């Protein structure tokens, strides 16, 4: 099913309902930074997935999936930064690795260059070590 503008608006509305409404005001203060980060990732993801069809199904698929995978990476990084559950943190780490590998595989399948090397998001400064409390 193609991503339509109405579907994207629906997802953005859901994100805003949880991030930009009165419901957000009732969230515990310690959860607000997490929700802000995740909602921003969702908005970037949904906006990035809005592509005009190019006539090449394969290219369109990859063009839509790259921001989708990047959004998953950003949400997993937020889990690592703010989450407390060690099992979920391990899952978040796996998501980051898996999504990065899939991004590389999709680019290679289309003959696109790989993104430049960069530190794993969990190694960036400011992110607590996975085994330490923030």
Image (spheres, rainbow, N blue to C red):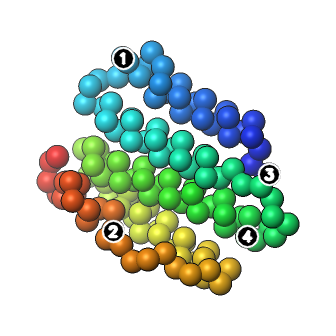
Foreground mark, 2 or 3, reads 2
Name the spot of residue 121 as percent of width and height, x first. Answer: 33, 62
In the image, taking residue 2 as reference, residue 46 lies left or right, namely left
- In terms of sequence position, does the residue under pointer 2 or pointer 3 come before the other? 3
- In terms of sequence position, does the residue under pointer 2 or pointer 1 come before the other? 1
- In terms of sequence position, does the residue under pointer 3 or pointer 4 come before the other? 3
Foreground mark, 1 or 4, reads 4
Residue highlighted by disc 3: 1
Which secondary structure, mark 2? loop
Q: What is the crowding at mark 4: few (fewer than 14 residues within 10 Å), some, or many (at least 20)?
A: some
The answer to whether residue 87 shows anywhere in this view is no
Residue highlighted by disc 4: 59
Measure the C-alpha gap from mark 1 to mark 4: 42 Å
Residue highlighted by disc 1: 26
Mark 1 touching mark 3, by CB under 8 A? no
Measure the C-alpha gap from mark 2 to mark 1: 33 Å
Measure the C-alpha gap from mark 2 to mark 3: 32 Å
When the figure is inspected, residue 17 is found, relative to residue 85, above or below; the finding is above
Q: What is the crowding at mark 2: few (fewer than 14 residues within 10 Å), some, or many (at least 20)?
A: few
- Identified at 27% across, 43% down, the residue is 82
Where on the picture, by quarter, is residue 120? bottom left
Name the spot of residue 12 as percent of width and height, x first. Answer: 60, 35
Which secondary structure, mark 4? helix
Residue highlighted by disc 2: 120
For this orientation, the residue located farthest to the left is 132
């Amino acid at each position: 099913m193609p991503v339509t503008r109405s579907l994207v608006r629906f997802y953005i509305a859901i994100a805003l309902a949880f991030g930009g409404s009165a419901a957000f005001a009732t969230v515990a203060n310690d959860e607000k930074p997490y929700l802000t980060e995740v909602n921003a990732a969702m908005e970037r993801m949904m906006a990035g997935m809005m592509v005009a069809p190019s006539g090449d199904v394969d290219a369109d698929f990859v063009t839509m999936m790259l921001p989708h995978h990047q959004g998953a990476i950003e949400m997993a990084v937020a889990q690592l930064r703010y989450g407390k559950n060690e099992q979920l943190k391990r899952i978040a780490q796996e998501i980051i690795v898996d999504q990065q590998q899939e991004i590389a595989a999709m680019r290679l399948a289309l003959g696109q260059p790989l993104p430049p090397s960069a530190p794993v998001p969990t190694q960036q400064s400011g992110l607590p070590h996975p085994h330490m409390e923030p």
